[in-house]
Each structure stands twice: as C-alpha cells, then as structure tokens.
Amino acid sequence: MSPKTDDLCYLSAVDLAARIRALEVSPVEVIDALRTRIDRLNPTLNAYVTLDLDNARKDADMKHKMRREHPAGNLGLLHGVPVAIKDDLEVAGLRFTCGSRLREKEIGKSDDLTVARLRKAGAIILGKTNEPEFGHKGVTENTLFGTTPTPWHPERTAGGSSGGSAAAVAAGLAYLALGTDIAGSVRIPASCCGIVGLKPSFGRIPRVPGYNAFVTQWYIGPLARTVADTALALRVLAGPDDRDPFSLPALGIDDLSLQGDLRDLRLTYCPRPTGVPVENEVAQAAETTVRLLGNRGVKIAVRQEPLPRAPLDALLVIFRAVSISDAGIKDEADFRNKRHLLTNTFAAFVEPGLKLKLGDYLAAQTSLTSFLEQSAPDFWKDCDVLATPTLAVPPFSTNLPMGPDQIAGRKIDPQVEWAFTWPFNLTGQPAVSIPCGWTRDGLPLGLQLAGRRGADGLVLRVAAAIEAQAPWSHRRPKE
C-alpha cells in the first residue's frame, strides 16, 4: 500500500466526512483502501472477527452516487465514514457471538439502536470486532477467535473488553468504533491502544433493544483517534429513546463544543485513586500531561490520598449476575452441560454467580446507593474535573489471562484492580481516556478525565485542550 493510501486510512473521521461532502474523496476509494489494510494486518492483529466488506463497498458506492447526484443534499454527519462494531452489539445479518462458542452460530436479527443511529448518520458498517467472552475481563481473548494484541506490540494486550474495536481504530482499520463498558471496557483498551475512549454519562447513549435497563453499570461508548471525532460520534449516538427509561435529553451543538475558556476550572489530579500502586512511568506521564492545563488557566490540585473506596465487591456481584444473564445460563446444571464451550476465565468468573440469591443482588445495589450518597457530594463540591491515570500499568503481556495480580509487590484482584476506570461505572459520571505519552519501549499510556454526571461536554473540552498542546493522532504503530 502506498503512503498516500495509508494517509487516507488515518484521516480523522471529521476530516474524512468533510472531504466526502466536498467530493474530494469517494467512500468507495476509502473502503478499497481499508480492505487492503485489513487484508494485510488483521490476520495478525485479529481486531475483526466478522467482516462485511462487500456490502460495505455497495453501501459506499450508493453513498457516493447520492452525494454526486444531489450536491446540495442534506447529508448525515458521518456520511460515508466506515465504522466498526463490537461483537456484543447486534447488527442485522452479521454474526452476534459475544466472543463465545455458546453463540458461535447466532446471527443478528436487528440493529442495536446505536448501530441504527450510525447508519442514519450515513456511516458504513465494516464488521464486528473481537472481545473476551461476554466482555467479562479487561483482556481480549477467547476460545472462539483467539487473542487481540495492541497494534503497538504483538505480545502486549490491546486491553478489553472492547479490545478489537480499539485495535481497529489505532491500526487505521476503521475511523470510529463502538465499544461497551461495564468496568472500563472502553477506556482500558483506549489506553492500551493509544486512542480516545469515552464512557458517557449514564443514560446519555440509550441501550436498546434487549438490555436490562435497570443494570446501571453497563454503557455503550465510542472509540476514536481524536477528541473531535469522539464528540462527533457522541452527537450521533446521544439522545433519548422511550424504550430506555433512563435515557437523557438530546445534546445541543453548543453542549459538545470543544472551544471555550477553561480559566478557573478546578481540576484535581489523583495518581492512586483506588489506593493501588502505580508504576512510575505511568504516574509521571499522567501528571506531566495534567500540568499542561496550567497554560489554560486551570486550577490544578494534587490529591495523594485515595478517593473513598467504592464497593468493588458490589460491582462484581452485579457483573456476575449480568454476565450469567447475557450468556443464557439458566442454572448450575445448565452451566455444567455447557462448561466445555466456555473460556476458562469466564467459567471461573460466572460460577460463583450461580449461587447468587436475590438478596445478594439487592444488597449490592444498596451498597452502591450508599456509596453515591456518602462519597460524591463532598468530593465534587471543590472539583469540576478529576484526572487519574487510566491504568496503573502499561499494556502487559498477552500471556496474562486476566491481567496482573500484583503491582510493586502488592497483591491485587486481576479482574479489574489494575484499572482506575470502574468507580465511574458505579457513579454514572462521564469519563474519557486519552493518550498521555508512551513508555521507553513505545507503549501507549492513558490519562482518564471524569466529571459530574451530565458534564460530558466539559470532560471532552478539557481533553481537547490537552490534545491541542500534546497531540497524539500523528503517531502510528509500526507494521
């Protein structure tokens, strides 16, 4: 592939959409360029598990003709922009496995609402991306499709559970991608792959059809190479739907403006938000990046002590219950009959959940409620945005089936404790991971920014201010 064609694949979604509208590039040309890259890179990267490139090219041809024949036509915000979809989001006519052999032959019957909104905005669906079985961990591997590494190193993890989506965007195999996030599954792979990943406010992006609306820790969010692309995707995906009782009102254009005065904004940087140790290279990169905001008049405070400890055990109780429900496992006998089809880590994770009782679930919800009532008001009284490292460690070996079980000699829960993402799934607040540097070995590091619930625009505006001073989208993984 020529450097010019590679450059086309690495355009921002905002830039690509503008060039397609101006007839400077055709969506067909874009699909052909992506197909060449996917054919070359995906066999090793394993970002896509199902591709629909022939239909994508037909769709691209139709969209090019539409633009050429109706130059004054009202086009969608993503007209002609190719996107990737995580395998636990339904796309009509495409495999819908959730990374599990239990669903190996399942085909999507209808589009998830988010997919339908992307199509309405003119996006072109490229295919489905890899994830761990039913998204149960922060590492992307399963027995159905195998492992997805970060594009920056073939033996380091892409993170998870939306690892395939993040790897596709980072490697120039998609312009945008959808992920899902129950404890960090958008932000973790964004950090590991050197891109932007947003978990929006609870209710900002509705979850229909087929989801338990009363599970408040489960989100859908976009992955992109720039903050502007992330804001564009959120404009398309956000807005109410009567089928989701918690969906929020639509956002206006001004709500997602990335311009604005940040003077006197109060930002707190907390290097160890949950008390877990942080590797020095991570902490130094995160704080150095935060300090850049001083140039914009932001008031920066450093908090060395951890935040109030959120009920991690309560989250895992709910997580297990949701995972069992997603997997379609009815009871312990059903689990035993299906055990040979399951990833070992998923089987070990859900088995304790089979013993959960209604009282356990309700107690977990009560614990989460108490956490919100007692912890949130005092902290946010003096803070507009909280900054933390996204992860306590750089991308780790793909040989670790769950993640590291210790950092700096301290034992941790490999399920999630090496990430600082999960508290914001409990609180419903928006949180975004952006690149904040690379290790000496060339591995990407992430900075997480969180705000009050509903402050999605402010969080993205702060992220854009950092990006303007320390841009990252020009960097590309070696091939």
Image (cartoon, helix red, strand yellow):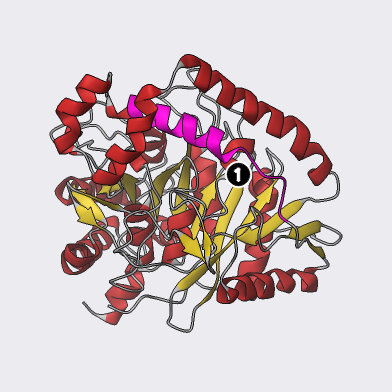
For image coordinates 64% across by 45% down, the residue present is 456
For image coordinates 49% across by 79% down, the residue present is 439
Residue 299 in the image: above or below residue 248? below
Q: Position of residue 157 (x, y in %)?
A: 35, 63
Question: Which of 393/453 is in front?
Answer: 393
Residue 263 in the image: above or below residue 334? below
For the image, the number of numbered tags is 1
Provide the residue span drawn in magenta: 306-325
Q: Relative to residue 469, is residue 342 drawn left or right? A: left
> Residue 452's quadrant in the figure?
top right
The outermost residue toward the top is: 358
Q: Is residue 217 magenta?
A: no
**Which residue lies under the disc numbered 1?**
423
Q: Relative to residue 194, is residue 425 drawn left or right? A: right
Residue 273 in the image: above or below residue 153? above
Q: Position of residue 253 (x, y in %)?
A: 64, 44
For image coordinates 55% across by 26% down, the residue present is 240
Residue 87 visible within the image: no
The outermost residue toward the bottom is: 440
The amino acid sitting under disc 1 is Pro
* Crowd rating for badge 1 (residues with CA inside 10 Å; few <14, some 14–19, many 20+): many
For image coordinates 21% across by 22% down, the residue present is 334
Q: Chief secondary structure of the magenta span?
A: helix
Q: Relative to residue 219, is residue 450 drawn left or right? A: right
